[in-house]
Amino acid sequence: MSINTQNDRTDETLTVVTRFENGFNARNLDATMADMTEDAVFEHVAPPGKSIGRFEGRDAVRAVFASLDEHFPNFDLRATEIFAQGDRATCRWEIEWDGPDGGRAHARGVDVFRMRDGMIAEKLTYMTL
């Protein structure tokens, strides 16, 4: 396989995904959504008892992101590794939140991104406790 580095968007993809993840953890919805296309898709696959679904369109995705503190109270999400090739990226992350027993709950996950025209067109999230 050959890669044309003149048309390679890897650096741009890394910049956008890193900014997105930082904005997401800071709960800056305006900044987070500014990096997503109007027809963005978000899919979340999680263990039983957590939110699971497919959401299409910027408004639907924003509503889900806005509700995350309801599902993961006082969450703190840390990207542990982000890598990209062209218009694809993957982010490994860890999240902690206030658990129902009063302690901190913990999970790990992976986001898989597909970019279009310098924006996030698709974010697929896979999570394990």
Image (cartoon, rainbow, N blue to C red):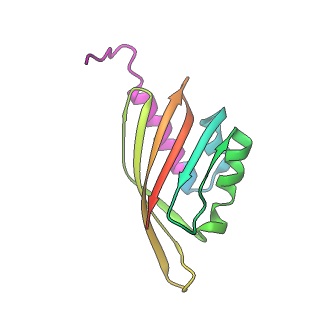
**Residue 45 shown left or right of residue 37 in the figure:** left
**Residue 13 shown left or right of residue 43 in the figure:** left
Q: What is the quadrant of the C terminus in the image?
A: bottom left
Is residue 105 or residue 31 the one in the foreground? 105
Q: What is the quadrant of the N terminus in the image?
A: top left
Is residue 56 or residue 62 the one in the foreground? 56
Residue in view at x 63 percent, y 61 percent: 68
Residue in view at x 61 percent, y 71 percent: 73
Q: Residue furthest left?
A: 1
Q: Residue furthest bottom?
A: 101
Vertical order, 47 against 54 (above or below)? below
Q: Position of residue 119 (x, y in %)?
A: 56, 31
Residue 7 in magenta stretch: yes
For the record, the magenta segment spans 1-22
Residue 98 in magenta stretch: no
Residue in view at x 37 percent, y 35 percent: 84
Is residue 72 or residue 26 the one in the foreground? 72
Vertical order, 86 against 44 (above or below)? above
Residue in view at x 51 percent, y 42 percent: 19
Q: Quadrant of residue 7?
A: top left
**Residue 123 shown left or right of residue 71 in the figure:** left
Q: Quadrant of residue 33?
A: top right
Q: Position of residue 26 (x, y in %)?
A: 57, 56
Q: Position of residue 46 (x, y in %)?
A: 51, 60
Q: Position of residue 107 (x, y in %)?
A: 44, 66
Vertical order, 82 against 48 (above or below)? above
